[in-house]
Amino acid sequence: MTEPAAPPSTEQSPDFQSAEFHPAGAGGTNELLRLAFPLIITFVSHVVMGVADTLVMGQVGTAEQGGVGLGSALFWSFSSFAAGLLSTVTTFVAQAYGARKHDEVRHSVVVGIGLALPLAAMLVALSFWVPELITLFGTNADAKPHVIVYLRWMLCSTPLFMLNFVLIGFFRGISDTVTPMIVTLLVNVVNITLNIVFVFGHFGFPEMGVQGVALATVISMGISVIVFFGLYFSRTHHARYHTRKPLPFAQIPFRRFLKVGVPIGISWFLENMAFNIMSLYIAAFDPASTAANTIVFQLCHVSFMPAVGISIAASTLVGKYIGAGRPDLAVRSARRSLVLSVAYMGTMGIVFITAPAFFIGLFNKDPQVLQLGVLALHLAAAFQIFDAMGVTIDGVFRGAGFTLLPMLIRLGVMWAIFVPSIFLLGHYVFETGIAAGWTAALIGLGLQGITLLIAFFVYPWWNKGRV
């Protein structure tokens, strides 16, 4: 893979040569891995938590397992616009950090918190209409009550979810991925423990089933917010970034933040809603299809989440080096990230093809679930490399503050091709919803990955300068 041509830098931040930037290995694989490895561990722990939820609910019942999976997917879709918008915190923090504008680092955190609370309030209000929404989506009768219970709990916890997102973005932006990793690992241990206690009714608690999984997640998120706020306002961070200092309203960069963040939010929302339309289409068939779809999504997370970690590392490094006036190092970091992500997800695709029945069987032994799951996992294996391209390049562009074109690409591919393909394939080609949905995903993610790769090499995103 050839590297996009970036002109040599003529504008460097005055203290760029300080040891903190490790100039000898700047933009190289070692620096990328130092930043990405804790992120990968963090996201793998999220995958383990999701797998634990799926395994626990598989012991309760197939309908419950599918209901929690669908509820989780719907929650992420409903919150994806806000999450994408708030991910801009990392971009602004990284660029201010790279430019040595330490006093500006907290600006985007203040904006993020200011936007997170009203956005979360709207999603909490949405929880009152969950039964009507689930009925409108046509979810099968067996899974429907479990989807409603889980989704209502999760929507009510949105303020905690959003604040976590903002605070983690601060730490990633200052190139500290170890602290979020440690906090997340500890909180996930609490989450998994509470799952078992609440779902099955240990230590005097009643058996809560689906409600127990949701309650464990809410408590864990609350603990995480408290810990991250304590660290953000710590003496060390206040001394350097003035985190306890009030920010005058005139200095709050709402307009710049929204200009970069709104396209990201729209992109995330469009893609997640497209995949939820796929999941809802599959869920209308039978509980076995819903359960198989949930399992394959969990397995894909094993491949996808580490790639997201690499993508965030790319976003941080690109933002830092653009802020430091070193577009050449931004390009170098981007290239290393893309190669690493494609290699990892390509390997996972081979693993999925090799033993699909084994992996599906870890979650559910039902013969129908096995048959449908193996088919979907074969199709998922085929798009791993393309998904790696899309995820990583999206992170690179986000770090550069180049977000409008990726949004337009997602709009065109996911909604003009992927979503219509689900229904066309389901009506004219396949007899099962799961075959139609995952074949459409292969087509959509393949086109999206290739289109973003072309944009990566053609458009001079590295020359945008600070946002």
Image (cartoon, rainbow, N blue to C red):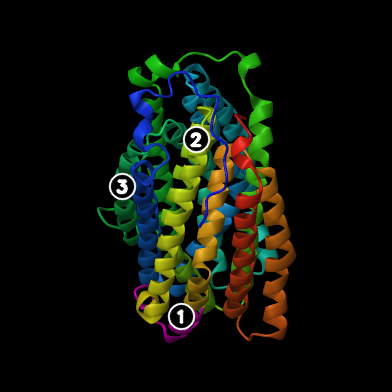
Question: Image point 58% across, 33% down: which residue?
Answer: 117
Along the viewing direction, whichever of 420 and 155 lies nearer the viewer: 420
Question: Image point 45% across, 74% down: which residue?
Answer: 62
Q: Is residue 126 above or below residue 463?
A: below
Question: Image point 43% across, 30% down: which residue?
Answer: 174
Label 1 close to label 3 by CB (< 8 Å) = no
Question: Image point 39% across, 70% down: which residue?
Answer: 58
Q: Is residue 454 above or below residue 246?
A: below
Along the viewing direction, whichever of 440 and 426 lies nearer the viewer: 440
Marked residue nearer the N-terminal end (3 or 2)? 2
Front of the two marks 3 and 2: 2
Query: Could you tell me which quadrant the C terminus lies in?
Result: top right
Reading the image, the residue beneath label 2 is: 163
Marks 2/1: CA–CA distance: 38 Å
Amino acid type assigned to the residue bearing label 3 in the image: Val
Residue 352's spot in the image, x, y percent?
41, 74
Marks 3/2: CA–CA distance: 19 Å
Q: What residue range appears in magenta? A: 361-375
Reading the image, the residue beneath label 3 is: 190
Residue 231's spot in the image, x, y percent?
36, 27
Q: Is residue 321 left or right of residue 127?
A: left
Would residue 389 be counted in the magenta stretch?
no
Reading the image, the residue beneath label 1 is: 374
Residue farthest to the left? 203
For label 3, the crowd category at 10 Å Cα-Cα, with few meaning under 14, some 14 to 19 and many 20 or more, is some
For label 2, the crowd category at 10 Å Cα-Cα, with few meaning under 14, some 14 to 19 and many 20 or more, is many
Would residue 369 be counted in the magenta stretch?
yes
Marked residue nearer the N-terminal end (2 or 1)? 2
Residue 346's spot in the image, x, y percent?
44, 66
Marks 1/3: CA–CA distance: 32 Å
Q: Is residue 302 above or below residue 170?
A: below
Marked residue nearer the N-terminal end (1 or 3)? 3
